[in-house]
Amino acid sequence: MIEEIVRFIVERLKIYLKEQEQVRQDVLNVVMNAYLESLESHKSVDILYLIKKIKFLDNFLSNDDHKKLIELYKRSTNILAIEEKKDNKKYRGRPSVLGFKSKYERLLYRRIKQISKDFYKFINKAEFEKAFALLAVIEAPLDHFFEHVVVNDVDNYARENRLILLAMIRDFFNEIGDLSKICG
């Protein structure tokens, strides 16, 4: 019964935000569908948190300053989707620092570790602007990573380590929503 009420409220909220606030439909779908899919894992229904997340993502995607970062994210998720399907597993966890073969892998991992704690702290407080401002720290290292590193190395250990590194990037963005499901 309670779950049905929550679903009703979320669906009404979706209609309101689309019609009254002109929020993009794809943004609404990504955030709200993810919320509804994980409804049992929520301890409480925080509609304000959900609204802040949706409005932030809508603004973030419409800002051209973030275009390069979004492209890098999508490149990361595309590689992961292909490799996870091929390997029939989901990459997660922490990469092995000893498994890094290049300075580009080490630098990217250092930057991820540098922002990780604060990023998740800001996300939990619904301070999405502050959280995603931290992602600017990984933009250049991620770009250099793609320029100089072959993810699908012949060495399977190095390959998996690199895929785990990309999964960490995906996890940052997916705190807001799976941008790979959003067009444009």
Image (cartoon, rainbow, N blue to C red):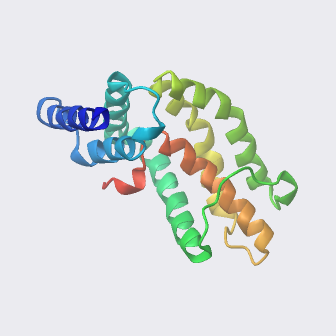
User: Which of 105/56 is in front?
Assistant: 56
- Residue 120 % position (x, y): 59, 31
Q: Is residue 146 left or right of residue 161?
A: left
Relative to residue 84, is residue 34 depicted above or below? Answer: above
Q: Residue at x 32, y 41 (%)?
A: 32
Q: Residue at x 79, y 68 (%)?
A: 157
- Residue 47 % position (x, y): 32, 25
Q: Is residue 115 visible?
A: no
Q: Residue at x 66, y 48 (%)?
A: 141
Dividing the image into 4 quarters, which one contains the N terminus? top left
* Total number of numbered discs in the rendering: 0
- Residue 22 % position (x, y): 17, 35
Q: Is residue 184 left or right of residue 68?
A: left
Relative to residue 38, is residue 88 depicted above or below? Answer: below
Q: Residue furthest right?
A: 98
Q: Quadrant of residue 83?
A: bottom right
Q: Residue at x 80, y 59 (%)?
A: 102
Q: Is residue 53 left or right of residue 81?
A: left
Q: Residue furthest left?
A: 19
Dividing the image into 4 quarters, which one contains the C terminus? bottom left
Relative to residue 152, is residue 107 depicted above or below? Answer: above
Q: Is residue 109 visible?
A: yes
User: Which of 37/94 is in front?
Assistant: 37
Relative to residue 68, is residue 122 depicted above or below? Answer: above
- Residue 136 % position (x, y): 56, 37
